[in-house]
Image (cartoon, grey):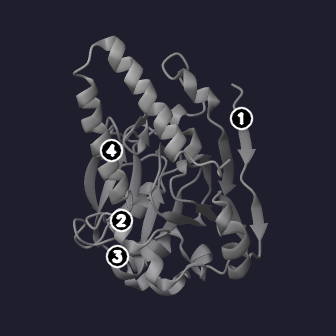
Amino acid sequence: MAFQRVPVPRLEGVSQDRFMQQLYPQRKPLVLEGIDLGACTSKWTVDYLSQVGGSKEVKIHVAAVAQMDFISKNFVYRTLPFDKLVQRAAEEKHEEFFISKDEKYYLRSLGEDPRKDVADIRKQFPLLEGDIKFPKFFKEEQFFSSVFRISSPGLQLWTHYDVMDNFLIQVTGKKRVVLFSPRDAQYLYLSGTKSEVLDIDNPDLVKYPLFSKARRYECSLKAGDVLFIPALWFHNVISEEFGVGVNVFWKHLPSECYDKTDTYGNKDPTAASRAAQILDRALKTLAELPEEYRDFYARRMVLYIQDKAYSKNLE
């Protein structure tokens, strides 16, 4: 199936000044190579993580299929000791399991109290802190969270966007990442922050005909690679091998723009949420009109929004 495919650029030895002054303002994905990440890329084996991570209980996603769907929730939440999770996630077949012998595991680390605390690998897994160095490209006060991720081989996460900038550090294993520009949101059949199109390589174009218009930005990540994912860029992640990654999120906007109850970094900015509520009220008001008038004034509203709010400066 022919899609518009664009390889994500790869650059080696990028300095903080070059990244912040030349690359970051472009607001496009970028794979950075040769970043000093510490000893984690060589030390974080299954045995080492099992030993150092210990038996701390972690909440995980368990799926009977490789393509996880957060809209239909085709997975269950379970709890395992961290060392057991690492060992099971590295297996192709399991002697101990919840659903099936070939079930998939996914850890997205949480704060101590997920309702109040953000994830930070340095706090939740302090014995691993000395092994990893975060890229020093942003100010410390912009830091939001560092999320520890562990995935079974073959696991595919749903296409979604986050509202903060993100460095995806591939510590071990390999991932394939497909990204879509925020400008292509109209082709992705969104339900909240997530796309309904699960199988992005063989989509049902009868059900999702516009999806073929979305331009795909693609890259493969190996141990030591760092993928910059700008805020609002959609991304779909496939773990080609058992792998460990760390996402470092930081605030692109002033702190007051974000929802203060958001511990995951995926709630829309407060102004965007207010605007959506206002639009919903406007649509309910339009519903009071006969169909002919409702259609006419709805089209005028769309044109007005395009004229007043669409950017003339983005590709």
Disc 3 to disc 2, how far (Cα)? 35 Å
Sequence-wise, the earlier of marks 3 and 1 is: 1
Q: Quadrant of the N terminus?
A: top right
Disc 4 to disc 2, how far (Cα)? 15 Å
Going by the numbered disc 3, the residue's amino acid type is: Gly
Q: Which mark is residue 258?
A: 2
Sequence-wise, the earlier of marks 1 and 4 is: 1
* Cβ–Cβ under 8 Å for marks 1 and 4: no
Disc 1 to disc 4, how far (Cα)? 31 Å
Which tag is nearer the camera, tag 4 or tag 3?
A: 4
Sequence-wise, the earlier of marks 1 and 2 is: 1
Residue found at x 25% / y 58%: 79
Mark 1 crowd level (few <14, some 14–19, many ≥20, 10 Å Cα): few
Query: x%, y% of residue 193?
Result: 40, 45
Q: Up-down: is 171 above or below 315?
A: below
Residue bearing the label numbered 1 = 4
Going by the numbered disc 4, the residue's amino acid type is: Ala
Asked whether residue 75 appears in the rendered view, the answer is no
Among all residues in the image, which is located at the extreme bottom? Answer: 130
Side of 220 where 299 appears, left or right: left
Sequence-wise, the earlier of marks 4 and 3 is: 3
Disc 4 to disc 3, how far (Cα)? 44 Å
Query: x%, y% of residue 229?
Result: 58, 59
Which tag is nearer the camera, tag 1 or tag 4?
A: 4
Disc 1 to disc 2, how far (Cα)? 33 Å
